[in-house]
Structure formats: structure tokens, C-alpha cells
Amino acid sequence: MTHDYGGSQRWCILRTSGSRTLALADSLTKAGFEAWSPRKTLRRAKAGVKRRADGTRPMVEIDAAILPTFVFARARDVQTLAQVACADITPHPPFSIFRHGGRYPEIADSSVRGLQEAEREATATIEAIRAAETREEAERIRKAAMKTERERLRAMQISEAQRRKALRNERGTFDDGQHVTVEDMPSFIGVTGIVQSSDGKSAVVVFGGMLTVTVEAWQLARA
């Protein structure tokens, strides 16, 4: 089953062990939360079964997480989820909520669209394999899907490199004492700093105490 969550609502990030990723998403969904982790169906040879006369073995299908350890839940439920995560007795697999700078960072729907597309492509591939009339045809579909995925990842990497190169050419003027946040740097999610100095290309930002970092101007936003 694929998921297509629209609207402008935001997500918080839950973390769990890799083997419990899908179990947590399913458990929370069953309990009434809007939770999701992208998944794909894998075909594997059935273990412990002898090969057929033609050398093949029966196949089984298993669900696998596309992004192990990560589950996304609607940010509107974050306080309730925090209580669930800390409860001594819970029907759900153990999990924590990603927290940084004393708050729970939220991500927009647009940030998970790539994962949603990966889930849709995985679903289309497994359906095509199921519909294949021969083992050879199913194998061709599988290999074609793997090639497409590799090409998509390469294209994403090239596109990201081009985006960063263009952004680095942008200049930004920040006044001394200006409060700013840092974008595109996960370690600074939710953290506000103060500009100590700026030359248009970059700025020296103080994040409290002795933590002073030089950040490129394109990565800064006024708080």
C-alpha cells in the first residue's frame, strides 16, 4: 500500500531499531495516529525448501523499510507520542522522538515527497513482477528497476551538487547582532545563533558559550 499525504501539515521524526521500523508504523497507525515509514516488498527464495527440477525455488514476499529506523508521525500528535514513548507499559515497539535544541524539529510534507515517490516506484515494480508470465520476464523487470533506481540516485546527486554550487554564488547581508537560523545543516536544526560579523559570502555566527561557527551566507535565514 502506498501513502500520499497532502496538505501543509508537518511531521515529527520517530526513531526505533531497524527491525522494528515497519512494526512501529503499523502499530501507531492501528492506534489512530497518522504514522508512516516508506516500505517496499522484496521477493526472496523460500528458506529450507529444496530446489525444483528446473533449479528454481519457491519465492516468498517480505515487507522491508526503505529508510530503516525512521518513522514519520504528524507533528500535531508530538506531545501525546512523547507520553507514549515514555510509558512503562505500551503496546508499541520502543521508540524515541528526535529532539534537538530543546524542541522537536518538524519537517514539511515536501521534505518526504522523494520517499513517497520511492515507495510508489517500489510498489509498481513488485506488481509488474507478480504479473510477469515467466521467471525470465520477472528477472528483466527487477534488473530494469534496479538500473532505474541507480540512475535516479545519480541524477539526484548531480542535481544536489548543482544546486549547492548555484547557492554558494549567492550573497547575503546580515547585520552584526542579527538572530539567524541555519538551513541545510541537520546538526543545527532548531538552533538560533547571533551574527558576529559578515562579509556577504559568509558570516561568523555565535551559538552560545564557546560555539562560534563560520557559515556560508546561503545557508542562513533571519530568525
Image: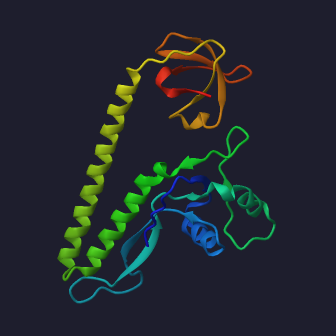
Q: State the image coordinates of residue 166 (x, y, percent, origin top left).
A: 35, 26
The outermost residue toward the front is: 7
Question: Who's the residue at 61% across and 52% down the image?
Answer: 12
Find residue 33 and report its image quarter: bottom right
Q: Is residue 3 left or right of residue 157?
A: right
So how many labels did they put on this image? 0
Q: State the image coordinates of residue 80 (x, y, percent, origin top left).
A: 74, 61
Q: Is residue 115 left or right of residue 221?
A: left
Q: Is residue 209 left or right of residue 107?
A: right
Question: Who's the residue at 28% across and 60% down the image?
Answer: 146
Q: State the image coordinates of residue 53 (x, y, percent, origin top left).
A: 23, 89
The outermost residue toward the right is: 88
- Of 218 and 129, nearer the camera is 218
Question: Who's the residue at 61% across and 58% down the image?
Answer: 74
Find residue 52 and report its image quarter: bottom left
89 shown above or below 9: below
- Of 108 and 70, nearer the camera is 108
Question: Who's the residue at 30% across and 85% down the image?
Answer: 51
205 shown above or below 12: above
- Of 16 and 200, nearer the camera is 200
Find residue 134 and report its image quarter: bottom left
The outermost residue toward the bottom is: 53
Viewport quadrant of the N terminus: bottom left
214 shown above or below 23: above
Viewport quadrant of the C terminus: top right
66 shown above or below 217: below
